[in-house]
Image (cartoon, rainbow, N blue to C red):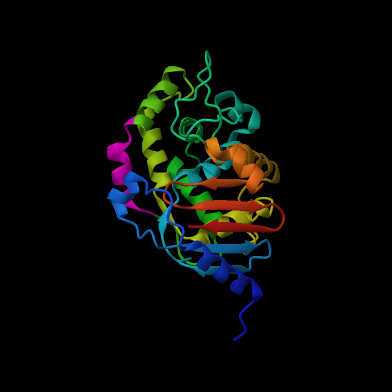
Amino acid sequence: MMISPLHRYLSEMLENLRPMTSGTVNPVTEVATNPDVNKVGITITTVNGHQYSSGDSDQKFAIQSIAKVFAYGLALDDLGPTEVGKKVDVEPSGDPFNEISLQRGSGRPANPMINAGAIATVGLIKGKGGTDRLSRISRHMELASEGSPGELEINRTVYHAENIGGHRNRALAWLLRSFEIIDSDPEPVVQDYFLECSTDVTTENLSMMAATLANKGVNPVTGREVFSEETTRQVLGVMMTCGMYDAAGNWMIDIGLPAKSGVDGGIMLVVPGQIGIGVY
């Protein structure tokens, strides 16, 4: 069996990266799943649906903040950018992901990629056609990942840990309620936010989800539209400027691609029109 040059390249690259040990494990993740810090994987998916992987590409981990991308896309498709923009701005915050970054007067979060903006975004999504909000968000992530191995499932252990330790996110939700950015009881909104972030994925799943965004919102294997082309364009723009939080500027200089990180170790990158990349 011939090994493609791309497989060989990915394998060599991962072997060079394996000795790197900087960084720390997210405390919630450490308590919930005690992850093996030696695991590393990468998958590339083309807009034709071909996948190339190396390393621990079948290792499951919680999607965490990468879910924010898909909730934002769903809110945009539901309500349009003007209505969503009244509640959540699209400006880089220059702050860490959990900063209390609300605009003076309006209480509007800086963007949908920081926690305050992501919680506000979940609050904008309503049930439809007998399907509740969380099921709709989960369904869109599943549609984007279809064609990659395995199904997406919520990791209840991670959710339980997030729920127990989620005081700051609850505080953000109540602040948003005080400004009427969230117009209902904040607790169900926070619960759905914790649950979407606790969805287990692999780099193969993430890469297919990224390739769907690279392919103008259409899953490259199934051909199903997950998001409209206009929504996908806005999602990628916000990923570009806000997806890496307070490191967004350096990320743009060094990498220059729309991306979203998650505290469980995942990064999703999009090369528009060409490929999607999932890294763990």
57 vs 276, left or right, is left
Q: Is residue 211 above or below residue 198?
A: below
**Residue at coordinates 46% horizontally, 58% vertically from top-left?**
20
Instruction: State yes or no: residue 108 in magenta.
Output: no
User: Hey, which quadrant is residue 9 in on the image?
Assistant: bottom right
Depth check: give the residue in front, 132 or 101.
101
Tell me where residue 93 sits by quadrant.
top right
- Quadrant into which the N terminus falls: bottom right
Q: Is residue 138 above or below residue 89?
A: below
For the residue pair 200 and 257, the one nearer the viewer reads as 257
- Front-lying residue, 116 or 76: 116
Residue 127 visible, this angle: yes
Q: Residue furthest bottom?
A: 1
Q: Which residues are magenta?
A: 154-167
Q: Which residue lies at the image location 45% right of the left edge and 29% below the top edge? A: 99
Q: Give x and y (percent) for residue 243.
A: 56, 41
- Left or right: 162 as drawn, with respect to 141: left
Residue 175 position within the rendered picture, expressed as x and y whole percent measured from the top left: 41, 21
Q: Please say whether residue 157 is one of the residues in the magenta stretch.
A: yes
Q: Residue at x 60, y 52 (%)?
A: 269
Q: Check the image and report above or below for 188 versus 57.
A: above
Magenta segment's dominant SS is helix
Instruction: Please say whether residue 132 is visible from this viewpoint.
Output: no
